[in-house]
Structures are given as structure tokens and as C-alpha cells.
Image (cartoon, rainbow, N blue to C red):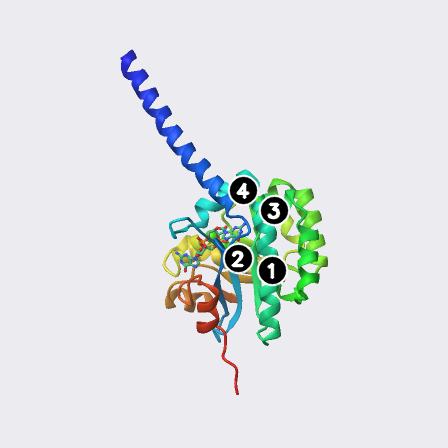
Amino acid sequence: AKLDGRNQATFFNEQMAIDSNKLLNLESELRKTLGTSRYKLYYQPKVRTGSHELCGIEALLRWTDDRGNIQPPNEVIPILESSGLIIDVGEHLIYQSCLQLKKWQDQGHFINYALNISARQLLNSNIVETMHKAITVTGCDPQYLEIEITESVVMSDVKTAFDKLVKLQALGVRIAIDDFGTGYSSLAYLTRFPIHILKVDREFVKELPMNKDSITITRSIIELAHNLHLNVVAEGVENIDQIKFLETIGVEEFQGYYFGKPMPLEEFERTCLPTKDD
Ligand code: C2E
Ligand code: CA
Ligand code: CA
Ligand code: CA
């Protein structure tokens, strides 16, 4: 039994060494490719309910490895976050976003531009100054800029989060709470914080309109949001039944595969932006 135990321990350690090696390699690849086109933003459309007209986008990070494979953000973001690289990457994405927004504004496309901001980016970087600089240098109209943060980011350091969000709002940027309803948090912050938008998590939308609990939760979120004068975006909308249901209960915006997956800039511009009337 002793021998077995030792062998198992050895095997376990080897497996752990392989895993941590993989992570280290990925981290060093992520570091080496900072500032290059291996980091790209994809764009997913958001539409107004009822008309289903384009009203905005969410920008989503895509990182390509050296073999040309796109690695999902769910693997890349945690490494960027734990290594602190997210701050450099984030600054780059903020600047790139303001530049793109300005281009669209110059072309007459006035759509909202939402960028995800992680905990470390909000709490441990100089995001207010970065944002301010990016807006000034590019000349974009910041009224169309949104940042998406999760409840857990707010709750992890309420004081710092509050301070940063107030300053970001002062720049003209709007703030969305992402994945709303999945984190446990004090609802009190909703009334005190400068928040403009709640995004209902895909987890609830997925089960609509069949699941009673999802219906109850979604209805409650919308009622709460509207009483607080917040707009509601339903994310992960994939079919017409979800759309019909969400329209009867008064959501303002949709985002999901039904209207478009996240796509590269050229594809987004070709397939989603209205063409100019001659
Ligand atoms: P999120 O902010 O909740 O983003 C929505 C995710 O849901 C995206 O996954 C999107 O592709 C996916 N999605 C959208 N509509 C549908 C749908 O109808 N059905 C299904 N099944 N999925 C849908 P993605 O792009 O893999 O991003 C995952 C997460 O990574 C994001 O979750 C966000 O938390 C994070 N992330 C992505 N880009 C960035 C970034 O630039 N900065 C930071 N800090 N985080 C990012
Ligand atoms: Ca988001
Ligand atoms: Ca989300
Ligand atoms: Ca989500």
C-alpha cells in the first residue's frame, strides 16, 4: 500500500508539473506577443428589442497561438489576470477600442461600444487615466463607450470600485453589470453606484421560456432594473421563443448567436453595419 501511495504521489506530481509547465509556456507566449496582432478584438452585435436594429457591440478578446489557433478567452483571461499582463493588454485594448469607435463615428455609425474590464484592470491599474488619454488622443465621443464589469469585481473591493466607477462615469463612459444574477452580492450597491445597464446572464436566458425559475428570476431582474432606471440587455439569445418572451417582459436589448456571433472586424462591418444610402 505504501508503494502504491508513493507511485500515485509521483504520478500526481508529474501531472501537476506538466500542467504548470503548459501554463508557464502559455504565459510566456502571451507576454512575448504583447502589442502584436495576435491579440484581436471580435465584435458581437447588440440589437434593440422590437425593431432588431443594431444598437451596439460587445468587443471580445481573441488571442491566436503560434499555430494559428484561436484560444478561448476563458483560458487566456485568467492567465493574463493572474500574471498581471491584463493591465498591458487592457491598455492596448482600450486604446484600440477608442480608435475603432472614432472611425465608426466618423463614418456616421453611432453605436455603443462595450469593452470587458476585469478585476485587476479596474482595481489595480490606472484605468481612469488610460481611458481619459485614449478618449482625448483618439477624439472619440465617450458617450458611446461602455465598460462591462461583473458583480464580483464590485464586491471584492467596494470602496476602490466605487471611486473608479465614479471617475469613469465623469469621463462620460457608461457602466454595465455583466452576468447579473450569477454572483451573490449586496443589491444595495445598485442604488449607490453609477450603473446604467444590467446584463441578464445567459444561464437564465438559456432556459426561457420553459423553466419556471428562469422566468421568475428574469422577470425580477427586469423589474428591479426598471425601478432603478437601468437598461436591461439579455445575453445568449439563441432562438425566437426566447426573443418573444423577453419582448413581452420588456428587455431593452438583445445579444446572442441568434443575431450574430462574435466576429472579426471586417466581417462585422460587412454583415452588420448598415450600408450607406447613396
Ligand atoms: P462575457 O462577457 O459574459 O461574454 C459573453 C460570452 O458569451 C462570449 O464568450 C460570447 O461569445 C458568448 N456568447 C454570446 N452570445 C452567445 C450565445 O447566444 N450562445 C452562447 N452559447 N454563447 C454566447 P467569449 O467571447 O468566449 O468570452 C468569454 C468571457 O471572457 C467573457 O464573458 C468575458 O468575461 C471574458 N472576456 C472576453 N473578452 C475580454 C476582454 O477583452 N477583457 C476582459 N477583461 N475579459 C474578456
Ligand atoms: Ca461581457
Ligand atoms: Ca456576460
Ligand atoms: Ca455570461
Q: Secondary structure at mark 1?
A: strand
Q: 37 or 250: which is nearer to us?
A: 37
Q: Secondary structure at mark 4?
A: helix
Compared with residue 120, is residue 232 higher up or lower down, i.e. above or below? below
Left or right? Give the position of 161 relative to 79: right
Q: Nearer the viewer, mark 2 or mark 4?
A: 4
Report the Cα–Cα distance between label 2 and label 4: 22 Å
The spot of residue 87 in percent (x, y) is 60, 46
Name the amino acid, label 3. Answer: Gln
Alpha carbon of mark 3 to alpha carbon of mark 2: how far?
20 Å
Residue matched to label 1: 146
User: Which residue position is annotated with label 2?
Assistant: 199
Q: Is mark 4 within 8 Å of ligand 1?
A: yes
Residue 210's disc is none
Residue at image mark 3: 121
User: Which residue is at 45% across, 63% downward?
Assistant: 264
Name the residue type under label 2.
Answer: Lys
Q: Is mark 1 within 8 Å of ligand 2?
A: no
Judging depth in this view, the residue of 275 and 112 nearest the camera is 275
Task: Please state which of residues 240 and 14 is positioned toward the viewer in this rendering.
Answer: 14
Image point (49%, 62%), residue name? 43
Residue plotted at (58% across, 44% down): 119
Disc with the residue nearer the chain's start (4 vs 3): 4
SS state under label 3: helix
Q: CA distance from mark 1 to mark 4?
A: 21 Å
Find disc 4 in the rendering and name its residue: 81
